[in-house]
Image (cartoon, grey):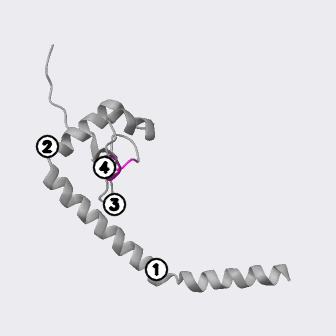
C-alpha cells in the first residue's frame, strides 16, 4: 500500500471563489456549517453533491490553515457587502416596492 498525499479538493473559480470538489458548494458554506457544529456527514446530507471524503479533506484543510481561511472568508464578506451596497444604490427597492403596490391597488379597483 502506498501513502499518497493529496491536495484538498478545493478549486478557485474565475471569480476568485473557492469551490469544494467538482461542485458549486463554496468553502465558505462548508466552513460555516462546520463552525455551527455540523459533522461531515451532516454537511454531505445538507449538500448531496459533496462527497464525504471531500468534506473531511476540506475540514482538515480548514483546521490546518485557520488563519489563512479566516482572511479569505473576511475578504469574501467584504466583497459581498460591497456588492450588496452597489446593488442597493443601483436599484431603489423602496421605489420599486411603491410602484408594485400602486399597480396592485390599481388592478384591484
- Looking at marks 2 and 4 on the same chain, the residue that comes earlier in the sequence is marked by 4
Specify whether residue 84 is in view. Answer: yes
Q: Position of residue 64 (x, y in %)?
A: 13, 43
Q: Which residues are magenta?
A: 25-32
- Magenta span: predominant SS is helix
Outermost front residue: 37
Which callout, 4 or 1, points at the residue further toward the start of the chain? Answer: 4
Image location (x, y in percent) of residue 40: 32, 35
Q: Residues within 10 Å of mark 1 (few under 14, many from 20)?
A: few
Locate the N terminus and report the quarter of the image it occupies.
Answer: top left
> Of callouts 2 and 1, which one flags the residue occurring earlier in the amino acid sequence?
2
Name the side, left or right, on which 68 lies relative to 13. left
Residue that label 2 marks:
64
Point out the frontmost of discs 1 and 3.
Answer: 1
The residue at the point 20 percent across, 45 percent down is 62
Element type where label 4 sits in the image? helix
94 left or right of 102 in image: left
Q: How far from the left and from the top, in percent, is residue 35?
A: 28, 48
For marks 2 and 3, give the one nearer the viewer: 2
Q: Which mark is residue 88?
A: 1
Q: Which residue is mark 4?
A: 27
Residues packed near mark 3 inside 10 Å, few (<14), some (14 to 19) or many (20 plus): few
Q: Which residue is rendered at x = 17% and y = 43% of the image?
A: 63
- How far is the residue under mark 3 from the one under mark 4? 14 Å
Quadrant of image for the C terminus: bottom right
Residue marked by disc 3: 15
Amino acid at each position: 500500500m502506498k501513502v499518497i498525499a493529496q491536495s484538498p479538493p478545493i478549486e478557485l473559480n474565475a471569480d476568485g471563489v473557492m469551490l469544494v470538489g467538482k461542485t458549486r458548494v463554496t468553502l465558505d458554506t462548508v466552513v460555516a456549517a462546520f463552525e455551527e457544529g455540523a459533522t461531515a456527514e451532516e454537511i454531505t446530507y445538507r449538500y448531496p453533491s459533496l462527497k464525504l471524503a471531500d468534506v473531511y479533506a476540506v475540514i482538515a484543510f480548514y483546521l490546518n490553515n485557520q488563519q489563512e481561511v479566516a482572511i479569505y472568508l473576511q475578504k469574501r464578506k467584504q466583497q459581498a457587502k460591497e456588492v450588496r451596497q452597489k446593488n442597493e444604490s443601483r436599484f431603489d427597492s423602496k421605489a420599486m416596492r411603491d410602484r408594485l403596490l400602486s399597480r396592485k391597488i390599481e388592478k384591484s379597483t
